[in-house]
Image (cartoon, rainbow, N blue to C red):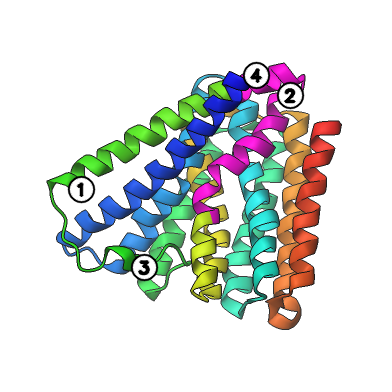
């Protein structure tokens, strides 16, 4: 058990460092070839913060662990909107706006509800995966045309530097790190689930989801410190949409996912969580400290219920 826990912690560290290496090095390389800041944010940074979810989800699906594959995405999205968003609001109330609520938030809600409806068939097919990926492409094209970004990492820390051959090595090291981290996390999670006598779904929707959400947590903390509330909200909502449309979509294209009864109940919880967050963002156009505590409390209660059910 201790070895599995140590392996899980090591895998989380690999995912976190790997994602940071990918973001920093890829952004420098892209800038060298005069790629715009907007394109960097919509592609490279989005890939970097969602790479842990992607590698763990795909790795689990290809190895036949469908529950971990789907639960990682569902759990990560719930963790983002419950624990991370709630914690950030407790630190400093979050101010929202019509674009975040009616465009990005509503799109995430409709996407989540659509996945729930399709899951009732018992399978997320390749065709449905194609629909999700197409939605992501259309969303990115729209943002590109409007010259807007859903809000992601700032790249100030690398301003003034120029890409070199070392950045190519760092980029490759980043992908190697998240690949190894994804494989180790799935292996450790299945072993932990067996040791605790709980299902793979429970481990995936709680511990694995929290581990793969580290980049979002670090991003939001940095944005909160700098007072970038809009970036923080955009990062969480945009990341959740990217997890579903990109991560889950590509995974379904590679291998259709069978949906267990536990997965269906988890999706219902997520639809409710997204709806609640939209209501909180719309009422007074802000999320207060008390409302943030409510979101954190809901997330903790869900974890307790998952482990004791």
Q: In this figure, which residue is indicated by the disc labeled 2? A: 199
Nearest to viewer (mark 3 / mark 2):
2
> Is tag 3's residue or tag 4's residue first in the polypeptide sequence?
4
Sooner in the amino-acid sequence: mark 3 or mark 2: 3
Q: CA distance from mark 3 to mark 2?
A: 42 Å
Between tags 3 and 4, which lies in front? Answer: 4
**Residue 177: x and y, percent?**
37, 34
Label 1 to label 2, Cα distance in Å?
41 Å
Q: Alpha-carbon neighbours of circle 1 within 10 Å: few (<14), some, or many (≥20)?
A: some
Residue at which label 3 appears: 144
On whether residue 34 falls in the magenta region, the answer is no
**Contact (Cβ within 8 Å) of mark 1 with mark 3:** no
Secondary structure under tag 2 reads loop
**Which residues make up the magenta segment?**
189-217
Q: Main secondary structure of the magenta part?
A: helix
Q: Judging from the image, what secondary structure is the residue with disc 3 in?
A: helix
Mark earlier in primary sequence (1, 3): 3
Local SS, label 4: loop
Residue 207 locus on image (x, y percent): 65, 36
Q: Are marks 1 and 4 in contact (CB under 8 Å)?
A: no
* SS for dot 1: helix
Residue 201, magenta (yes or no): yes
Residue 97 against residue 11 in the figure, above or below: below
């Amino acid at each position: 058990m201790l070895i599995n826990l140590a392996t899980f912690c090591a895998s989380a560290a690999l995912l976190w460092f790997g994602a940071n290496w990918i973001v920093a090095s890829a952004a420098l390389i892209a800038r060298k070839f005069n790629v715009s800041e907007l394109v960097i944010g919509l592609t490279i940074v989005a890939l970097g913060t969602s790479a842990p979810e992607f590698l763990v989800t795909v790795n689990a699906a290809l190895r036949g662990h469908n529950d971990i594959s789907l639960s990682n995405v569902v759990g990560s999205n719930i963790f983002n909107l419950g624990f991370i968003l709630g914690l950030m609001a407790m630190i400093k109330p979050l101010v929202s706006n019509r674009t975040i609520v009616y465009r990005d938030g509503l799109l995430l809600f409709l996407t989540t509800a659509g996945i729930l409806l399709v899951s009732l068939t018992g399978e997320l097919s390749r065709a449905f995966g194609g629909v999700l990926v197409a939605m992501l492409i259309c969303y990115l094209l729209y943002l590109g045309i409007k010259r807007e970004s859903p809000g992601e990492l700032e790249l100030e820390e690398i301003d003034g530097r120029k890409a070199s051959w070392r950045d190519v090595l760092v980029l490759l090291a980043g992908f190697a790190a998240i690949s190894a981290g994804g494989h180790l996390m799935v292996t450790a999670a299945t072993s932990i689930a067996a040791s605790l006598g709980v299902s793979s779904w429970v481990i995936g929707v709680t511990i694995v989801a929290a581990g793969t959400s580290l980049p979002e947590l670090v991003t939001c903390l940095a944005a909160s410190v700098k007072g970038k509330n809009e970036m923080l909200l955009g990062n969480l909502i945009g990341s959740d949409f990217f997890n579903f449309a990109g991560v889950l979509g590509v995974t379904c294209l590679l291998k259709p996912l069978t949906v267990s009864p536990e997965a269906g109940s988890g999706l219902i919880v997520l639809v409710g969580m997204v709806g609640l967050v939209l209501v909180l963002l719309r009422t007074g156009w802000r999320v207060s400290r008390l409302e943030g505590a409510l979101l954190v409390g809901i997330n903790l209660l869900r974890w307790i219920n998952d482990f004791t059910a």
